Protein backbone atom coordinates (compact mmCIF):
# COMPACT_ATOMS: atom_id res chain seq x y z
CA UNK A 1 0.00 0.00 0.00
CA UNK A 2 1.36 3.41 -1.07
CA UNK A 3 1.42 6.04 1.68
CA UNK A 4 0.35 9.56 0.80
CA UNK A 5 2.48 12.44 2.13
CA UNK A 6 1.04 14.31 5.07
CA UNK A 7 0.20 17.88 3.97
CA UNK A 8 0.77 19.12 7.52
CA UNK A 9 4.32 17.75 7.55
CA UNK A 10 5.06 19.51 4.23
CA UNK A 11 3.78 22.88 5.42
CA UNK A 12 6.34 25.46 6.61
CA UNK A 13 6.81 25.59 10.36
CA UNK A 14 6.25 29.34 10.57
CA UNK A 15 2.64 28.90 9.47
CA UNK A 16 2.99 30.56 6.07
CA UNK A 17 1.80 28.83 2.94
CA UNK A 18 4.10 27.07 0.52
CA UNK A 19 3.09 29.47 -2.28
CA UNK A 20 4.17 32.54 -0.34
CA UNK A 21 7.70 31.18 0.14
CA UNK A 22 8.60 31.36 -3.54
CA UNK A 23 7.01 34.26 -5.45
CA UNK A 24 6.46 33.68 -9.13
CA UNK A 25 9.42 34.63 -11.33
CA UNK A 26 7.06 36.54 -13.62
CA UNK A 27 6.04 38.78 -10.71
CA UNK A 28 9.66 39.56 -9.85
CA UNK A 29 10.38 40.27 -13.51
CA UNK A 30 7.34 42.51 -13.75
CA UNK A 31 8.46 44.62 -10.77
CA UNK A 32 11.99 44.86 -12.17
CA UNK A 33 10.77 45.85 -15.64
CA UNK A 34 8.49 48.50 -14.19
CA UNK A 35 11.44 50.01 -12.33
CA UNK A 36 13.57 49.94 -15.49
CA UNK A 37 10.69 51.49 -17.41
CA UNK A 38 9.79 54.29 -14.99
CA UNK A 39 13.32 55.61 -14.44
CA UNK A 40 14.22 56.38 -18.09
CA UNK A 41 10.70 57.63 -18.75
CA UNK A 42 10.94 60.23 -15.98
CA UNK A 43 14.44 61.21 -17.09
CA UNK A 44 13.28 61.69 -20.68
CA UNK A 45 10.36 63.81 -19.56
CA UNK A 46 12.73 66.10 -17.66
CA UNK A 47 15.23 66.38 -20.51
CA UNK A 48 12.52 67.12 -23.08
CA UNK A 49 11.55 70.24 -21.14
CA UNK A 50 15.24 70.93 -20.47
CA UNK A 51 15.58 73.94 -22.84
CA UNK A 52 12.59 75.63 -21.24
CA UNK A 53 13.91 74.92 -17.75
CA UNK A 54 17.34 76.28 -18.68
CA UNK A 55 15.78 79.49 -20.00
CA UNK A 56 13.63 79.85 -16.88
CA UNK A 57 16.65 79.42 -14.60
CA UNK A 58 18.66 82.00 -16.56
CA UNK A 59 15.77 84.48 -16.44
CA UNK A 60 15.31 84.03 -12.67
CA UNK A 61 19.04 84.45 -12.00
CA UNK A 62 19.27 87.60 -14.11
CA UNK A 63 16.11 88.99 -12.51
CA UNK A 64 17.75 88.58 -9.08
CA UNK A 65 21.04 90.12 -10.20
CA UNK A 66 19.62 93.05 -12.17
CA UNK A 67 16.42 94.95 -11.24
CA UNK A 68 16.28 96.32 -14.79
CA UNK A 69 16.08 92.94 -16.50
CA UNK A 70 12.34 92.28 -16.10
CA UNK A 71 11.24 95.79 -17.06
CA UNK A 72 9.03 95.94 -20.15
CA UNK A 73 11.52 98.17 -21.94
CA UNK A 74 14.35 95.70 -21.49
CA UNK A 75 12.19 92.70 -22.38
CA UNK A 76 11.21 94.48 -25.58
CA UNK A 77 14.88 95.01 -26.36
CA UNK A 78 15.60 91.31 -25.78
CA UNK A 79 12.82 90.27 -28.15
CA UNK A 80 13.96 92.77 -30.78
CA UNK A 81 17.59 91.71 -30.56
CA UNK A 82 16.66 88.03 -30.72
CA UNK A 83 14.36 88.39 -33.71
CA UNK A 84 16.99 87.92 -36.43
CA UNK A 85 18.48 84.86 -34.70
CA UNK A 86 15.00 83.40 -34.19
CA UNK A 87 14.02 83.84 -37.86
CA UNK A 88 17.19 82.13 -39.06
CA UNK A 89 17.01 79.44 -36.36
CA UNK A 90 13.60 78.34 -37.63
CA UNK A 91 15.08 77.66 -41.06
CA UNK A 92 18.31 76.21 -39.67
CA UNK A 93 16.14 73.78 -37.70
CA UNK A 94 14.64 72.38 -40.91
CA UNK A 95 18.10 71.97 -42.42
CA UNK A 96 19.52 70.22 -39.36
CA UNK A 97 16.51 67.89 -39.15
CA UNK A 98 17.56 66.57 -42.58
CA UNK A 99 21.13 66.02 -41.29
CA UNK A 100 22.38 69.16 -43.01
CA UNK A 101 23.83 72.52 -42.06
CA UNK A 102 23.72 76.01 -43.58
CA UNK A 103 26.77 78.16 -42.89
CA UNK A 104 25.76 80.88 -45.35
CA UNK A 105 22.75 82.40 -43.58
CA UNK A 106 24.64 85.39 -42.13
CA UNK A 107 26.33 86.31 -45.41
CA UNK A 108 23.10 85.74 -47.33
CA UNK A 109 21.31 88.12 -44.99
CA UNK A 110 23.99 90.79 -45.54
CA UNK A 111 23.84 90.37 -49.33
CA UNK A 112 20.04 90.57 -49.32
CA UNK A 113 20.11 93.75 -47.23
CA UNK A 114 22.67 95.38 -49.55
CA UNK A 115 20.62 94.45 -52.62
CA UNK A 116 17.53 95.91 -50.98
CA UNK A 117 19.37 99.15 -50.20
CA UNK A 118 20.58 99.41 -53.80
CA UNK A 119 17.06 98.88 -55.11
CA UNK A 120 15.77 101.56 -52.73
CA UNK A 121 18.37 103.98 -54.10
CA UNK A 122 17.13 103.27 -57.63
CA UNK A 123 13.39 103.33 -56.89
CA UNK A 124 11.28 104.29 -53.85
CA UNK A 125 9.02 101.26 -54.31
CA UNK A 126 8.60 99.46 -51.00
CA UNK A 127 7.31 96.33 -52.74
CA UNK A 128 10.33 96.07 -55.03
CA UNK A 129 12.74 96.50 -52.11
CA UNK A 130 11.10 93.71 -50.10
CA UNK A 131 10.81 91.39 -53.11
CA UNK A 132 14.46 92.02 -54.01
CA UNK A 133 15.63 90.98 -50.55
CA UNK A 134 13.45 87.89 -50.47
CA UNK A 135 14.46 86.81 -53.96
CA UNK A 136 18.16 87.29 -53.23
CA UNK A 137 18.00 85.05 -50.19
CA UNK A 138 15.89 82.46 -51.99
CA UNK A 139 18.33 82.37 -54.91
CA UNK A 140 21.30 81.69 -52.63
CA UNK A 141 19.34 78.97 -50.86
CA UNK A 142 18.43 77.37 -54.18
CA UNK A 143 22.11 77.37 -55.20
CA UNK A 144 23.03 75.67 -51.92
CA UNK A 145 20.41 72.94 -52.20
CA UNK A 146 20.85 72.27 -55.90
CA UNK A 147 24.65 72.15 -55.76
CA UNK A 148 24.60 69.82 -52.76
CA UNK A 149 22.00 67.39 -54.09
CA UNK A 150 22.66 67.32 -57.81
CA UNK A 151 26.37 68.07 -57.57
CA UNK A 152 26.64 64.98 -55.37
CA UNK A 153 28.75 66.81 -52.79
CA UNK A 154 29.68 64.70 -49.74
CA UNK A 155 28.27 67.20 -47.24
CA UNK A 156 26.39 70.54 -47.32
CA UNK A 157 29.18 72.03 -45.19
CA UNK A 158 31.22 72.42 -48.38
CA UNK A 159 28.76 74.32 -50.55
CA UNK A 160 27.39 76.49 -47.73
CA UNK A 161 30.93 77.42 -46.68
CA UNK A 162 31.60 78.42 -50.29
CA UNK A 163 28.45 80.53 -50.55
CA UNK A 164 29.32 82.10 -47.20
CA UNK A 165 32.42 83.58 -48.83
CA UNK A 166 30.78 84.33 -52.17
CA UNK A 167 27.76 86.11 -50.66
CA UNK A 168 29.93 88.16 -48.30
CA UNK A 169 32.24 89.11 -51.14
CA UNK A 170 29.33 90.16 -53.34
CA UNK A 171 27.89 92.27 -50.53
CA UNK A 172 31.23 94.05 -50.04
CA UNK A 173 31.71 94.53 -53.78
CA UNK A 174 28.20 95.87 -54.47
CA UNK A 175 28.34 98.29 -51.54
CA UNK A 176 31.95 99.34 -51.96
CA UNK A 177 32.60 98.03 -48.47
CA UNK A 178 30.43 100.77 -46.92
CA UNK A 179 26.97 100.68 -45.35
CA UNK A 180 24.19 101.92 -47.61
CA UNK A 181 21.72 104.16 -45.80
CA UNK A 182 18.00 104.32 -46.37
CA UNK A 183 15.07 101.89 -46.29
CA UNK A 184 11.33 102.24 -46.90
CA UNK A 185 9.21 103.18 -43.90
CA UNK A 186 7.49 99.79 -43.86
CA UNK A 187 10.84 98.00 -43.62
CA UNK A 188 11.89 100.35 -40.80
CA UNK A 189 8.67 99.57 -38.95
CA UNK A 190 9.06 95.81 -39.39
CA UNK A 191 12.62 95.88 -38.10
CA UNK A 192 12.59 98.66 -35.52
CA UNK A 193 8.96 99.57 -34.82
CA UNK A 194 7.07 98.91 -31.57
CA UNK A 195 3.49 98.26 -30.55
CA UNK A 196 3.56 99.49 -26.97
CA UNK A 197 6.69 97.84 -25.58
CA UNK A 198 6.53 94.85 -27.94
CA UNK A 199 8.70 95.09 -31.07
CA UNK A 200 6.93 94.46 -34.37
CA UNK A 201 9.74 92.07 -35.27
CA UNK A 202 8.48 89.78 -32.48
CA UNK A 203 5.17 89.47 -34.33
CA UNK A 204 7.11 88.64 -37.51
CA UNK A 205 8.89 85.85 -35.62
CA UNK A 206 5.60 84.61 -34.18
CA UNK A 207 3.99 84.48 -37.62
CA UNK A 208 6.92 82.59 -39.13
CA UNK A 209 6.99 80.19 -36.18
CA UNK A 210 3.28 79.44 -36.61
CA UNK A 211 3.78 78.90 -40.35
CA UNK A 212 6.75 76.58 -39.73
CA UNK A 213 4.74 74.66 -37.15
CA UNK A 214 1.89 74.16 -39.61
CA UNK A 215 4.30 73.06 -42.33
CA UNK A 216 5.98 70.48 -40.11
CA UNK A 217 2.95 69.19 -38.21
CA UNK A 218 0.02 69.48 -40.60
CA UNK A 219 1.57 68.80 -44.00
CA UNK A 220 2.96 65.63 -45.51
CA UNK A 221 6.11 67.59 -46.37
CA UNK A 222 6.76 68.04 -42.67
CA UNK A 223 6.64 64.28 -42.09
CA UNK A 224 8.96 63.84 -45.05
CA UNK A 225 11.73 66.04 -43.64
CA UNK A 226 11.70 64.11 -40.36
CA UNK A 227 11.72 60.83 -42.28
CA UNK A 228 14.61 61.96 -44.49
CA UNK A 229 16.64 63.01 -41.47
CA UNK A 230 15.73 60.06 -39.29
CA UNK A 231 16.25 57.29 -41.86
CA UNK A 232 17.34 58.36 -45.37
CA UNK A 233 17.43 54.80 -46.74
CA UNK A 234 13.99 54.09 -45.35
CA UNK A 235 12.70 57.33 -46.87
CA UNK A 236 13.95 56.22 -50.29
CA UNK A 237 12.28 52.84 -49.92
CA UNK A 238 9.07 54.61 -48.93
CA UNK A 239 9.15 56.54 -52.24
CA UNK A 240 9.68 59.89 -50.51
CA UNK A 241 11.24 62.46 -52.90
CA UNK A 242 14.39 62.81 -50.81
CA UNK A 243 16.22 65.11 -53.23
CA UNK A 244 13.30 67.48 -53.52
CA UNK A 245 12.86 67.60 -49.76
CA UNK A 246 16.52 68.43 -49.19
CA UNK A 247 16.55 71.16 -51.84
CA UNK A 248 13.36 72.65 -50.38
CA UNK A 249 14.80 73.10 -46.88
CA UNK A 250 17.80 75.02 -48.26
CA UNK A 251 15.51 77.19 -50.37
CA UNK A 252 13.48 77.96 -47.23
CA UNK A 253 16.70 78.70 -45.36
CA UNK A 254 17.63 81.26 -48.01
CA UNK A 255 14.14 82.74 -47.91
CA UNK A 256 14.42 83.07 -44.13
CA UNK A 257 17.73 84.92 -44.64
CA UNK A 258 15.82 87.36 -46.85
CA UNK A 259 13.22 87.88 -44.11
CA UNK A 260 16.02 88.36 -41.57
CA UNK A 261 17.54 90.95 -43.94
CA UNK A 262 14.28 92.90 -43.84
CA UNK A 263 14.30 92.89 -40.03
CA UNK A 264 18.00 93.75 -39.81
CA UNK A 265 17.83 96.48 -42.46
CA UNK A 266 14.81 97.95 -40.72
CA UNK A 267 16.69 98.18 -37.43
CA UNK A 268 19.74 99.75 -39.10
CA UNK A 269 17.78 101.79 -41.67
CA UNK A 270 20.09 100.48 -44.37
CA UNK A 271 22.08 97.56 -45.67
CA UNK A 272 25.50 96.77 -44.22
CA UNK A 273 27.87 94.33 -45.97
CA UNK A 274 29.36 93.33 -42.61
CA UNK A 275 26.09 92.56 -40.85
CA UNK A 276 25.43 89.00 -39.82
CA UNK A 277 29.05 88.03 -39.22
CA UNK A 278 29.20 84.75 -37.26
CA UNK A 279 25.40 84.75 -37.22
CA UNK A 280 25.43 81.25 -38.67
CA UNK A 281 27.07 80.04 -35.46
CA UNK A 282 24.38 81.71 -33.35
CA UNK A 283 21.62 80.02 -35.31
CA UNK A 284 23.27 76.61 -35.06
CA UNK A 285 23.79 77.19 -31.33
CA UNK A 286 20.13 78.15 -30.89
CA UNK A 287 18.94 74.97 -32.62
CA UNK A 288 21.36 72.77 -30.66
CA UNK A 289 20.43 74.41 -27.36
CA UNK A 290 16.81 73.72 -28.31
CA UNK A 291 17.55 69.99 -28.43
CA UNK A 292 17.86 69.29 -32.16
CA UNK A 293 20.32 66.59 -33.17
CA UNK A 294 22.94 66.69 -35.92
CA UNK A 295 22.05 63.04 -36.50
CA UNK A 296 18.77 64.25 -37.97
CA UNK A 297 15.11 63.52 -37.44
CA UNK A 298 14.79 65.47 -34.19
CA UNK A 299 13.89 69.04 -33.27
CA UNK A 300 10.87 71.24 -32.56
CA UNK A 301 9.89 74.78 -33.48
CA UNK A 302 9.22 75.78 -29.87
CA UNK A 303 12.63 74.63 -28.65
CA UNK A 304 14.41 76.39 -31.53
CA UNK A 305 12.75 79.64 -30.44
CA UNK A 306 13.72 78.94 -26.84
CA UNK A 307 17.34 78.47 -27.95
CA UNK A 308 17.29 81.79 -29.81
CA UNK A 309 15.81 83.53 -26.77
CA UNK A 310 18.42 81.87 -24.57
CA UNK A 311 21.23 83.47 -26.56
CA UNK A 312 19.49 86.86 -26.56
CA UNK A 313 18.75 86.72 -22.82
CA UNK A 314 22.31 85.69 -21.89
CA UNK A 315 23.86 88.48 -23.95
CA UNK A 316 21.43 91.08 -22.66
CA UNK A 317 21.96 89.98 -19.07
CA UNK A 318 25.74 90.09 -19.35
CA UNK A 319 25.52 93.58 -20.84
CA UNK A 320 23.34 94.72 -17.95
CA UNK A 321 25.83 93.22 -15.49
CA UNK A 322 28.79 94.86 -17.30
CA UNK A 323 30.39 91.51 -18.02
CA UNK A 324 33.43 91.70 -20.28
CA UNK A 325 32.35 91.27 -23.90
CA UNK A 326 35.16 88.77 -24.43
CA UNK A 327 33.59 86.45 -21.85
CA UNK A 328 30.22 86.28 -23.62
CA UNK A 329 31.27 83.74 -26.28
CA UNK A 330 32.69 81.56 -23.49
CA UNK A 331 29.33 81.50 -21.70
CA UNK A 332 27.48 80.69 -24.93
CA UNK A 333 29.98 77.88 -25.60
CA UNK A 334 29.43 76.39 -22.14
CA UNK A 335 25.66 76.45 -22.70
CA UNK A 336 26.11 74.65 -26.03
CA UNK A 337 28.24 71.95 -24.39
CA UNK A 338 25.57 71.42 -21.74
CA UNK A 339 22.88 71.18 -24.43
CA UNK A 340 24.88 68.63 -26.45
CA UNK A 341 25.56 66.57 -23.34
CA UNK A 342 21.84 66.56 -22.56
CA UNK A 343 21.25 65.23 -26.07
CA UNK A 344 23.74 62.41 -25.40
CA UNK A 345 22.00 61.57 -22.13
CA UNK A 346 18.64 61.61 -23.89
CA UNK A 347 19.87 59.09 -26.45
CA UNK A 348 21.14 56.83 -23.67
CA UNK A 349 17.82 57.08 -21.82
CA UNK A 350 15.90 56.28 -24.99
CA UNK A 351 17.94 53.12 -25.44
CA UNK A 352 17.30 52.15 -21.82
CA UNK A 353 13.62 52.82 -22.32
CA UNK A 354 13.45 50.55 -25.36
CA UNK A 355 15.16 47.79 -23.40
CA UNK A 356 12.74 48.25 -20.50
CA UNK A 357 9.76 48.20 -22.86
CA UNK A 358 11.00 44.96 -24.39
CA UNK A 359 11.48 43.43 -20.94
CA UNK A 360 8.03 44.56 -19.87
CA UNK A 361 6.49 43.03 -23.01
Image (spheres, rainbow, N blue to C red):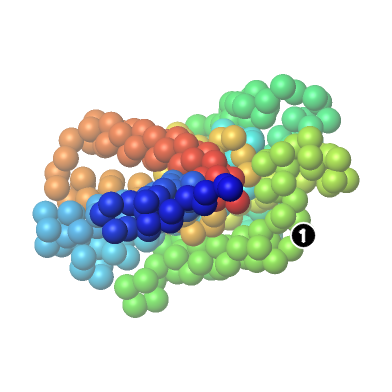
What percent of the width, then of the height, locates residue 36? 44, 46
Residue 21 screen position, x and y as percent: 37, 50
The answer to which image quadrant residue 78 occupies is bottom left
- The answer to whether residue 224 is left or right of residue 239 is left
In the foreground, 116 or 99: 99
The residue located at (37%, 71%) in the rendering is 198
Q: Residue at x 39, y 35 (%)?
A: 341
Relative to 96, is 228 on the left or the right?
right
Q: Is residue 165 above or below residue 192?
A: above
Identity of the residue drawn at 21% across and 65% down: 70
Q: Which residue is under mark 1?
A: 220
User: In the image, is 108 to the left or to the right of 324?
Assistant: right
Q: Is residue 41 visible?
A: no
Mark 1: few/some/many CA within 10 Å (<14, 14-19, 20+): few
Q: Residue furthest bottom?
A: 196
Residue 295 position within the rendered picture, expressed as x and y whole percent measured from the top left: 59, 35
Is residue 24 among the parts visible in the rendering?
Answer: yes
Q: Residue furthest front?
A: 1
Q: Choose between 236 and 246: the one closer to the eye.
A: 236
SS state under label 1:
helix
Residue closest to the eye, 224 or 359: 359
| x and y, in percent, of residue 288 in the image | 47, 41
Amino acid sequence: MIERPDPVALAPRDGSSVQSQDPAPSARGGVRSRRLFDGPRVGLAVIRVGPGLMLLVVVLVLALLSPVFLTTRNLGNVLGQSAVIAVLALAQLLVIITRGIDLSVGSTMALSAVVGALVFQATPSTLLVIVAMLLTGTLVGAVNGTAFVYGRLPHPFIITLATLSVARGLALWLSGGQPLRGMPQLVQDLGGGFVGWLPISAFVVGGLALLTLLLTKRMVWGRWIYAVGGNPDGALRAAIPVRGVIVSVYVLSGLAAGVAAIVSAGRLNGGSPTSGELLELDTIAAVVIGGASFLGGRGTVANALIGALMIGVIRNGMNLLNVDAFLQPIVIGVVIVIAVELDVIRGWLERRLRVAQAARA
